[in-house]
DNA sequence: GTACGTGCAAAGAATTTGCAGATAA
DNA sequence: TTATCTGCAAATTCTTTGCACGTAC
């Protein structure tokens, strides 16, 4: 619990009850949930929670660097508490998003071929059929 | 003109007047336009054009591999006639999307660390401030 | 004639906004 | 107090759907 509060404070976010719950959910569920998934999961525990607050909170978390916004899924925006450089794989069949290690060679690209642009965010997305779905 | 028709046919898309116009626009404007930009640009020339047709056509182009769907911009989906492997840079200030060469080392990743997943699409997105905006 | 393409209007879904009440330093 | 946070409802925006008409082979 305390680690969640610290995480918020490290990123200059005042730890309200709702924000703690949302940050905590993101840290414990590395499934890259959508706004709706988070809302649905927390609603029973926090009956007064509104979707607006989930939207607001995720926006702040993302802006302050406490979470990452993923646009890999065209339908819904997803969120990830892991802000370290890593790639994502979206399975077109089951919809799951997997984390993938980000090769060092890949990171190097940023320092080289950027034509003078200043890079603040890196998103590596792969899409296809995941191992599990291929086996079925 | 003929090259546009060929491009459609190569991807098993019947070349209607609207489809040719949209494919042509994409091939001549490498600015990664949105549905709205394409619609607005072509409307004067094709007064009866509907946005539904633009949506339909871009969906087909993307499904058939004649164009690429980009989700780098959280607000709008963008389209790119260049389907060869290359990365994209989105400037958070001016909103422009730049093409970037895709390092060979990057492509290699697909064959190695994929945990058995079958990759069908690769999207490399970078975000930040572009050279031009930094100079202003 | 039959299958396909187009475009209007309506529906649907995701997200944002305005604002009033609740909360906290 | 004084800022900020929350949550409802309404508005907005993007995209899809249903359907009738048009077109082409």
Image (tube, coloured by chain):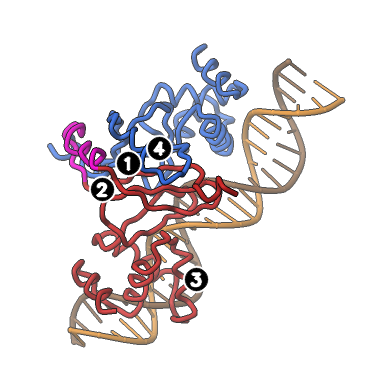
Chain colours: A red, B blue, C orange, D brown
Marks 3 and 4, how far apart in space?
A: 31 Å
Which residue is labeled 1 in the image? Answer: B125
Residue B6 image-quadrant placement: top right
Q: Is residue A41 above or below residue A100?
A: below
**In the rendered image, the vertical position of residue A30 relative to residue B129, given as above or below:** below
Residue drawn at point x = 29 percent, y = 40 percent:
B90
Report helix, strand or loop for mark 2: strand
Q: Chain of mark 1?
A: B
Q: x%, y% of residue B133?
A: 18, 39
State whether residue A50 appears in this view.
yes
What residue is pinned by disc 4? Answer: B122
Q: Nearer the viewer, residue B103 or B78?
A: B103
Chain of the residue displaying label 3: A
A98 and A22: which is toward the camera: A98
Alpha-carbon neighbours of circle 1 within 10 Å: few (<14), some, or many (≥20)? many
Please, what secondary structure does the residue beneath circle 1 have?
Answer: strand
For the magenta stretch, what is the residue range? Answer: A104-119
**Residue B72: in sight, yes or no?**
no
Q: Callout 3: helix, strand or loop?
A: helix
What secondary structure is marked by label 4? strand
Task: Say which label, 3 or 2, has the lower sequence index.
Answer: 3
Per the image, the residue denoted by label 2 is A121
Image quadrant for the C terminus of chain B? top left
For label 3, the residue is A40
Discs 1, 2 touching: Cβ within 8 Å: yes
């Amino acid at each position: 619990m305390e680690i969640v509060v610290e995480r918020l404070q490290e990123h200059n976010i005042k730890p309200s009850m709702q924000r703690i719950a949302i940050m905590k959910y993101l840290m414990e569920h590395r499934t890259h949930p959508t706004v709706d998934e988070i809302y649905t999961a927390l609603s029973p525990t926090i009956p007064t929670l509104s979707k607006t607050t989930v939207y607001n909170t995720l926006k702040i978390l993302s802006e302050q660097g406490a979470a990452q916004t993923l646009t890999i899924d065209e339908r819904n925006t997803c969120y990830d508490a892991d802000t370290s450089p890593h790639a994502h794989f979206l399975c077109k069949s089951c919809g799951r998003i997997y984390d993938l290690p980000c090769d060092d060679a890949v990171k190097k690209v940023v320092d080289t071929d950027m034509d003078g642009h200043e890079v603040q965010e890196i998103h590596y997305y792969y899409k296809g059929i995941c191992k599990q779905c291929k086996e079925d």
